[in-house]
Image: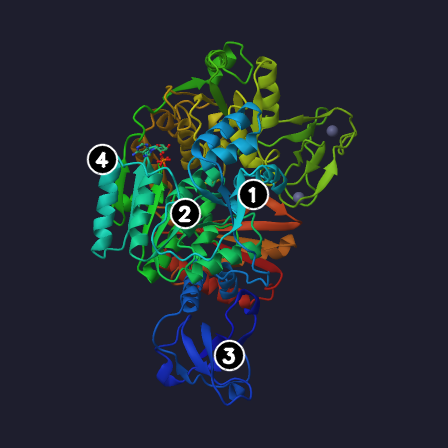
């Protein structure tokens, strides 16, 4: 047996591994992550290194391969932990060890350590309130936002102000000059006590919240480490409960990771945590440079930061004594990585927690079927919060409008009569409206009115999407052309854009309600840094009457003045090829409905749909998760989909179609001939939904089986066999566990 050993464990040096023979006496001890002593170069002094992989075959001349001297025993280092986690990810998701290590290890960067700065407010309480009022009167939105935040806390980290709050250095300058705020260097700060830096004290938890928090704390104190699911309706106060749990774990001298999907990671959310835990909190997001992230991770490792908030990748924060991982909006698809290793944050968090003796808390108003099934079968501890936390806020009244009936009555507009009347009423009362477009599969493409052909990407099997600047763009490969004056197929000049994007809806809203102030939020309007925050803040601050948007608008912000949510075409996401589309539709509609009536005024939700009887829609309208769960599980059971069965998707891709066909057929045959493959359900090979991308053709094999380990073994055997084929090298293979 041989071990690949790395001496300097860092992202950049991963390719520099050395192979050593494992002596008999050490065989049992050596696995990925173990630290070993090895002879190195001509030096007489042995060096320390980490085993990253164990192999049966020697890569070089076995005669010349040196032997491992010994295992370094004792405490398990962080690097060992990281390697072990990477190993687990490699095994679980079928990537290479290198890909897994690159995911787990931060990119080290030789950046000059930037000085951490904080903003402080120099005004007295009364002066501050006057300044807020003045900023509001003068419509200095950004300034108002900042000053308002100071009414709740004394200091705010500089990066948060330029990041999540979206202020520029230039806009802060006059405030500094007038002596309203000061920018100060954050002196090294290692106070282990929790230092809420606010004027505002924590809310006192209501009885339902208290019951959950107390149970968690008791079990934590008893040394029970487990995964819990906090299933609480939107606005039930889950975040407050997390904070109570976090406080408890921090007080034990341990650290906490909080995962929040990127679109919900607004400054409102971040400030809530900052208000509670002060400078111990750090935030990472995907817009940060590798150096900025590394900086945050380093602070965590040194103990300057004890609560890390961020999207999926925050999971890899190198805390010395991790005690708790919270995953908010646990059902979000963004928790699954699209790059190899295609890991799921929920599962990876559980493994990480197991390695560290930490607990995991999952939270959602619409739990994933996976999580809820585990909670029902006792694998997770289940907590429920059935009511909204604020006394004066109630769940909204929801109604469903059948668009087919509207059409029969001659209404061809995108607004049903009911929705239009409701909108008129809100506008009259100066209340706000959100219009939500369920946009999946709903892109604007250009087609010919003479021959009917749509303009397609020459490299991919998709239509090109029309952008604002009259350019056509491929969302798969980035290919871009100006809209041609004539149809490329028949030469007709009559070509036009089709589809109802958010932009088109914005235009229609303006036609029907010329007086209304409309804001739009979609990929186009938020592509700039901070664009997303800017629009949501403007709306929250009353800068518009109507906000039109895609799923982006349903998360993160509390809009107390929104009393009507209109869902324009609820069923669009039902017709996707993904077996989870019913679940996604239900989640989106429930989340969107949860936006209405957050304040004192009651809320109303109108769902427009062509399939009013479909259970994803009826259950969302009734806000009945349990009934949805039962029906959806029956469907998964009948069709053998997860979580009832495990599903392995094998994507096979090649530049040449005949090679692809051969490889796909052979792989199917191998599975059938394998011992493990005996009663695996095999579907395909079929063409991928988008067959050609970047001039590469793709086919898919689906394998279903209740037992995950068997699928893993099949995957390993397939990988081995591929190595032996003549077409290996011309074919790319990707494994994905659903
Ligand atoms: P969730 O995370 O479940 O959507 P939040 O924690 O964001 O819910 O709470 C929703 C709103 O209710 C927030 O404005 C929050 O400040 C408020 N809230 C939560 N718990 C309480 C409480 N115990 N007393 C008063 N207000 C609360
Ligand atoms: Zn044509
Ligand atoms: Zn393309």
| Marked residue nearer the N-terminal end (3 or 2) | 3
Q: Would you say residue 580 is visible in this rendering? A: no
Question: Callout 3: 10 Å neighbours few (<14), some, many (20+)?
Answer: many
Cα separation between marks 3 and 4: 59 Å
Residue 85 image position (x, y, % from top left): 41, 62
Whichever of callouts 4 and 1 sits on the residue coming sooner in the sequence is 1
Tell me the SS state at disc 1.
Answer: helix
Of 351 and 681, the residue lying toward us: 351
Distance between the alpha carbons at the discs numbered 1 and 3:
47 Å
Q: CA distance from mark 2 to mark 1?
A: 17 Å
How many neighbours does mark 2 have within 10 angstroms: few (below 14), some (14-19), or many (20 or more)? many
Q: Secondary structure at mark 4?
A: helix
When the figure is inspected, residue 306 is found, relative to residue 687, above or below; the finding is below
439 vs 653: above or below = above
Taking the spot 69% from the left edge, 29% from the top edge, the residue there is 447
Mark 2 element type: helix
Nearer the viewer's eye, disc 3 or disc 2?
2
Q: Position of residue 545 (x, y in %)?
A: 52, 20
Q: Are marks 2 and 1 in contact (CB under 8 Å)?
A: no
**Earlier residue among tags 2 and 1:** 1
Judged left or right of residue 394, residue 112 is right
Residue identifier under label 3? 19
Query: Which residue bears the numbered disc 4?
Result: 207
Q: Which residue is mark 2?
A: 278
Callout 3 secondary element: strand
Task: Give the mark nearest the N terminus, 2 or 4.
Answer: 4
Residue topped by disc 1 = 162
User: Where residue 275 sits: x, y (%)?
Assistant: 40, 42
Quadrant showing the N terminus: bottom left
Q: Earlier in the sequence, mark 3 or mark 4?
A: 3
């Amino acid at each position: 047996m041989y071990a690949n050993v790395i001496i300097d464990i860092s992202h950049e040096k991963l390719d520099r591994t050395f192979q050593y023979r494992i002596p008999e006496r050490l065989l049992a001890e050596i696995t990925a992550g173990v630290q070993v002593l090895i002879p190195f170069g001509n030096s007489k002094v042995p060096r320390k290194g980490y085993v990253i992989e164990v192999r049966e075959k020697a890569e070089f001349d076995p005669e010349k391969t040196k032997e491992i001297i010994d295992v370094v025993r004792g405490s398990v280092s962080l690097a060992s932990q990281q390697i072990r986690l990477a190993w687990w990810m490699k095994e679980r998701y079928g990537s290479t060890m290198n890909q897994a290590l690159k995911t787990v290890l931060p990119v080290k960067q030789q950046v000059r350590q930037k000085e951490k700065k904080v903003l402080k407010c120099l005004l007295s309480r009364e002066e501050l309130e006057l300044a807020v009022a003045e900023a509001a009167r003068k419509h200095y939105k950004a300034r108002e936002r900042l000053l308002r935040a100071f009414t709740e806390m004394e200091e705010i980290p500089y990066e948060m102000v330029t990041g999540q709050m979206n202020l520029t250095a230039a806009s802060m300058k006059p405030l500094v000059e007038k002596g309203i705020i000061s920018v100060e260097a954050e002196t090294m700060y290692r106070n282990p006590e929790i230092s809420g830096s606010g004027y505002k004290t924590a809310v006192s938890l209501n009885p339902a919240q208290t019951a959950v928090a107390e149970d968690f704390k008791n079990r934590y104190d008893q040394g029970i480490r487990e995964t819990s699911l906090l299933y609480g309706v939107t606005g039930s106060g889950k975040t407050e409960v997390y904070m109570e749990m976090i406080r408890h774990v921090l007080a034990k001298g341990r650290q906490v990771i909080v995962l929040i999907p990127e679109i919900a990671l607004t400054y409102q959310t971040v400030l809530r945590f900052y208000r509670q835990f002060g400078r111990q909190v750090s935030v990472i997001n995907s817009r940060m440079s590798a150096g900025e992230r590394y900086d945050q991770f380093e602070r965590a490792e040194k103990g300057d930061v004890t609560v890390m908030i961020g999207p999926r990748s925050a999971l890899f924060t190198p805390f010395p004594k991790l005690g708790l991982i919270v995953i908010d909006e646990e059902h979000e698809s963004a928790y699954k990585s699209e790059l190899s290793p295609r890991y799921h944050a929920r599962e990876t968090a559980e493994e990480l927690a197991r390695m560290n003796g930490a607990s995991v808390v999952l939270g959602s108003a619409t739990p994933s079927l996976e999580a809820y099934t585990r909670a029902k079968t006792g694998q997770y501890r289940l907590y429920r919060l059935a009511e909204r936390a604020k006394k004066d806020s109630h769940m909204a009244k929801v109604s469903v409008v059948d668009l087919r009936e509207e059409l029969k009555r001659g209404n061809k507009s995108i607004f049903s009569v009911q929705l239009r009347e409701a909108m008129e009423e809100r506008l009259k009362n100066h209340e706000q409206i959100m219009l939500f477009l369920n946009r999946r599969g709903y892109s604007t493409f250009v087609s010919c009115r003479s021959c009917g052909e749509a303009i397609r990407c020459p490299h991919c099997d998709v239509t090109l999407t029309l952008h604002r600047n009259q350019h056509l763009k491929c969302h798969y490969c980035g290919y871009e052309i100006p809209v041609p004056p004539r149809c490329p197929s028949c030469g007709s000049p009559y070509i036009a854009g089709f589809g109802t994007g958010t932009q088109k809806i914005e235009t229609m809203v303006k036609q029907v309600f010329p007086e209304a102030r409309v804001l739009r939020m979609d990929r186009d309007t938020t592509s700039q840094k901070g664009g997303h925050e800017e629009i949501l803040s403007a709306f929250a601050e009353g800068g518009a009457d109507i906000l039109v948007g895609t799923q982006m608008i349903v998360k993160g912000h509390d809009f107390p003045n929104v009393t009507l949510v209109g869902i324009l075409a609820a069923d669009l996401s039902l017709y996707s090829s993904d077996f989870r589309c019913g679940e996604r539709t239900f989640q989106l509609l429930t989340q969107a409905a949860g936006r209405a009536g957050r304040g004192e005024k009651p809320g109303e939700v109108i769902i427009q749909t062509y399939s009013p009887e479909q259970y994803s829609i009826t259950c969302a309208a009734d806000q009945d998760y349990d009934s949805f769960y039962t029906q959806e599980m029956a469907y998964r059971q009948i069709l053998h989909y997860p979580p009832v069965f495990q599903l392995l998707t094998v994507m096979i891709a090649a530049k040449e179609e005949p090679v692809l066909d051969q490889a796909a057929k052979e792989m199917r045959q191998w599975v059938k001939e394998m011992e493990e493959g005996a009663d695996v359900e095999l579907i395909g090979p079929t063409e991928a939904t988008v067959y050609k991308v970047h001039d590469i053709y793709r086919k898919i094999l689906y394998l279903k089986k209740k037992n995950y380990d068997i699928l893993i073994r099949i995957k390993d055997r397939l990988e081995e066999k591929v190595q032996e084929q003549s077409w290996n090298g011309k074919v790319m293979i990707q494994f994905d566990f659903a």
